[in-house]
Amino acid sequence: MSEGMVVSEGRITVEDVVCKTGIDELDVQLDGGIPVGNTVLMVGSSGSGKTTICMQFLANGARQGERGVFFTITEPLFKLTKNMQGFDFYDKKLIESGMINLIDLRIISERLGLDAEKYTVEDASALLEVLKDIADELNVKRLVIDSITALCYRLQTKEMIRDFIFKLGSSLAAMNCTTFLTSEVPPNEVKYSQYDIEEFIADGIIFLGDVDRSGDLIRTLQLIKMRGTAHSRIKSAMSISSKNGIELTPLLKSRA
Amino acid sequence: MTNTLIDGLKERVSNAITINQSVGVILPGNNYSDLIQALFEHIHSRSEDVWVYVTITRPYESIFKQFGDLSSGGNIKFIDCISRAAGLPKIDPNCIFIESPAHLEKIIMEILNIFRNIGDNVQKYLIIDSLSSLLIYNDAQLVTEFFTHLTNRTRLSDIHSVSIAIEEEMSDNINKIIYLRSDKIIKLRESFI
């Protein structure tokens, strides 16, 4: 039996072992959902929909009674909430009730007296401890860090980045919550991370890209890896709409 | 004369679509307007059914101008695939405007989204106007794949479909696939007039 399974009166339910994203087509591709406790790298260039998927993941979880936390280091909170207000999945009450917690890591850095632009190894470890404490205290089941790229950007050397990422991996593994780490990559490159190391702590990789069709860009989503589930690897066309949030359908392939 | 033609068309389409799940209509460009009029008259007479009309041939606004507010019956929704791409931005609660007719997957998503909210006891109909117009914006193999994918999904969801193809715009691929995937083909000849 894998870690995270709960046996209740001899019965194991699907919800005990998988974390449904609530995006129907994605859950089908994941063979039910993300195995509970997995750390998933959400990779894409700017504007590819990483933050929207993460917020929808948290909102859908909150509606099922799973508390979530969104740590941002790229956008101020007011901007984040403003961008999400246009989506039907967004409900202010989920934030007011504490089912979704939005936390600006830059504010925490300030409170810890850290240099907001440059972190030492000790600074990064302190930040990680705070992050872990918040997650434990809130008893969150879903966690998002947006973005790991921006977080690592504040570290000075490759060695520091590598150490931090491995520490982050160990901390996340101990938390038993399902985590999305967003990873920014340049457009039109099949690359999963900026520092070529983030993918090694990830149990899963979801790649968001674009396909050029007659000059129009079609958004795509592809599951590259997901430990613990027999997932699909097909490339899907992805749509982002205010009414339905993220929607997927198999991408049509032109052989021309 | 014209009324006889339209009544005849209406009867043929009506009979075919009632019996068959997937109907292909191949016609010369000259008869296009007559067919559209026949289809809208049929839709108007079937207020208990739900229709989704995907237009790639004419902007929704132009259909609206010619046939009036077809949505007053509450049983038809439009998906306009060309207006936004042509720089004719419109907002209409009865029409979904797709960014580009090259975004075929989005067309499929919007069709299925509309029908998803319709009860099982209601007859559901889809009109694609037209498959051949999609060839202006997409390569033939892609349109073939789109049509195959769409008909698979509509069959599974008990949606009847009418797919129009204008002879002058047809390619061999579309000709083959429309014959292959349709339960019934209505081929209109000018001699029919």
Image (tube, coloured by chain):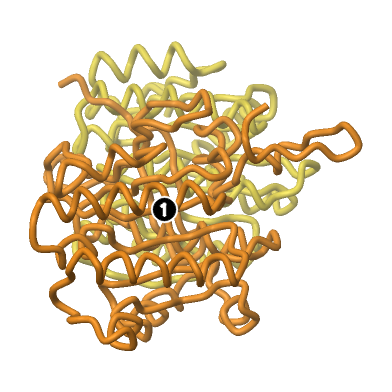
Quadrant location, the N terminus of chain A: top right
Q: Secondary structure at mark 1?
A: strand
* Chain letter, yellow: B
Q: Position of residue B52 (x, y in %)?
A: 54, 48
Q: What is the quadrant of residue A136 in the picture? A: bottom right
User: Residue B33 vs residue B51: left or right?
Assistant: left
| Above/below status of B174 relative to A170 | above
The residue that appears at 70% across and 37% down in the rendered structure is A5
User: So how many labels did they put on this image?
Assistant: 1
User: Residue A13 vs residue A228: left or right?
Assistant: right
The residue that appears at 64% across and 56% down in the rendered structure is B75
Quadrant location, the C terminus of chain A: top left
| Above/below status of A252 relative to B62 | above
- Of all residues shown, which one is farthest toward the front? A122
Q: Position of residue B192 (x, y in %)?
A: 44, 24
Identify residue type, mark 1. Phe
